[in-house]
Amino acid sequence: MHTAGTARTLAAQNGEYVTMSIAEEPLSTAEAPSNRSIDLRAWSRRSESSIAAFGRTETAGAAALLVAAVAALVWANADFGSYERTWSTRLSVEIGGSGIAMPVQGWINSGLMAFFFFVVGLEARAELDIGELRDRTRIIAPLLAGLGGMAAAVVVYVVVNVGSSTGHGWGAAMSTDTALALGLLALIRPPFPDRLRAFMLTVMVVDDAVSLIVVATVYSTRISVTPLVVALGIVAVMVLLVMRRITSGGIFLVLALPAWVALSKSGIDPVVLGLVMGLLAYASPAARSDLERATDLFRGFREQPTPALARAARIGLQSAVAPNERLAEFFHPWTSFLVVPLFALANFGLAINGSFLVHAIGSAVTLGIALGFVVGKPAGVAGVTWLVSRLSRGRLRPAVGWLAVTGGATLTGATFTVSLLVASIAFRGEALREAKLGILLAAVASAIVSAVVFSTSRMLRGPARTRALLGTTASISDLVVPVDPDRDHLRGPAESLVTLVEYGDFECPYCGQAEPVVRELLADVGDLRYVWRHLPLVDVHPRAKLAAVASESAAAQGAFWPMHDLLLDHQDALRPDNLVGYAQAIGLDVERFRRDLESHFGKDRISEDVEGADLSGVSGTPSFFINERRYRGAYDLTTLKEAVRLAKAQALVNR
């Protein structure tokens, strides 16, 4: 129970915290339960997008891939006959006398791996829609770098294999393994990895797309036109459905299965279908109208809990989230911990002995693949990036520093999945074993070289280190309405290198959880300016708008922050009489406050904040922007401090 004389830490108008006594009328226990009972750990992760969650999964996924590769090597060297028999066992699916028959390895390579490329496409589409690459000029440098890296790797392979019958296997020296490279990036943990991930992802999506085209054309058997036309027709139907915002997973699954079969029958490896479907799944912030509709559907179910209304509420909740995020959250763990490790287990079995190593180390296939990835690939990626930046006079420079470009380029030599896929098609017998050894050597060497490159950043200090890793390209602005010191409610130094903007709702329990975290952040980070903007979610918080009016009425008397703190501390007691009590507690002119409250003082300002939130793609609370960039990470103090530290470092470089 909140009673008169309860101590409360408040913020004075200048942003400093002071302790004062709240003299207010006693509140009933029913009115004032604490919102702090919400699990802070669940809240701190609740807003983390599927894009941010990739980083956590990639580390464990890379470890799972390495474990599976080692297991394949152990199995193959313990009993190669058993290993080969297991994966060469033929499985067939027939319906009405017509069907498909492939070895177990083929079902994994052409079937399950389509899900892997589907996830790659999802992450690429997310970067294009809501990530770094929505600024289309930032696509050009990594796109050309990806093509340059592939070309350089192929040239190295062809030069090493010139005049040899193994020259046709150049496709095995083309593509980076997206899962392995990003997993190694997470394991190496260079400073400021987010922009580098976006740069690398673009390079590797180009890799995957071109490699799959090569697989589908150069390394495919005789192409049958009729099934190919059927597959393209089904894909066209999918595109039309997406354009009409029809994104039902069941519908797309029904369409994807015959498309996959048709591509298989056409002679083109059907894994390309996964990448195409991933790129079709658009990403966007949840629209407030969709969230309000979902709320209405849930209320209908709450009032009348019938199966039909339960199904409608479930569909409404799902449709409020963009298909890209829904699908990525579901499929990414499966591909990281099942599909890719199973692929490694089925393909990386390599019987190794002394005589084989002596012969293979000097073979053209092994050397061509290893040198192509360790030397050619990084040289092509870094060289083309530099050339594009130079020729464009810096207009198309990468969104990361040159040390990060170099480290990322060396990571593109981490090959596995697509190279194994091409090698299993292009080679047989001893040549296939040599190719696998070259792939293994390239992956290990690339990881070591990348770790060495990024470790050199420790020799740099201050702005020089930040510039080498982040570059001088400005961050993309997500905040449509910039901060105005003459209008916005500010806490902290008026002139700061870092500005943290929060769109909040005084009745939102998560905003209540955010308040002490923000307070600690302001106390720990000296050069930080904090801005509160209103986003009352009236469909779920009926008293939020009146509470926002109360804060603006207090602001008219120079006491926005004391009222702000009280409202967040008493989120379950926001009735008009409670608000008047808070005004009295902080020493306001109560009659003036009451008149302002009744006339909805500040309603235009609140509406402007809501409109600004809509324009910036904000639909939920709390939503944070750091230096006008939408923050999509976790809301715990440690993670937020790291994000602020990064923003400050970037601001120092660009100042």
Image (cartoon, rainbow, N blue to C red):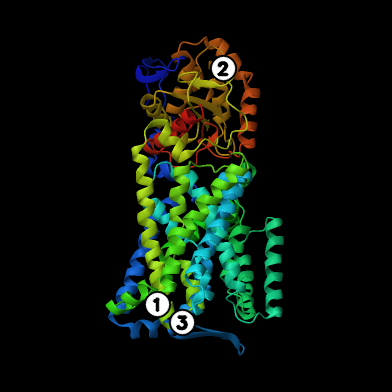
Residue at 36% from the left image edge and 51% from the top image edge: 451
Say what amino acid the circle numbered 1 marks: Arg
Task: Please provide percent x and percent y for residue 265.
Answer: 62, 80
> Which of marks 1 and 2 precedes in the sequence?
1
- Residue for badge 3: 428
Q: Nearer the viewer, mark 3 or mark 2?
A: 3
Q: Is residue 217 left or right of residue 66?
A: right
In the rendered structure, find residue 433 and report the number of the disc placed on it: 1
Say what amino acid the circle numbered 2 marks: Ser
- Residue for badge 2: 553
Task: Please provide percent x and percent y for residue 66.
Answer: 35, 64
The answer to whether one can see residue 121 in this image is no
Q: Nearer the viewer, mark 2 or mark 1?
A: 1
Q: Is residue 452 left or right of residue 557?
A: left
Task: Please provide percent x and percent y for residue 148.
Answer: 56, 56
| Real-space CA distance between mark 1 and mark 3, rounded to the nearest whole angstrom | 8 Å
Badge 1 crowding class, 10 Å Cα cut-off, few under 14, some 14 to 19, many 20 or more, is many
Residue at 43% from the left image edge and 51% from the top image edge: 55
| Real-space CA distance between mark 2 and mark 1, rounded to the nearest whole angstrom | 76 Å
Task: Please provide percent x and percent y for residue 296.
Answer: 61, 46
Say what amino acid the circle numbered 3 marks: Arg
Residue 369 is drawn in which quadrant?
bottom left
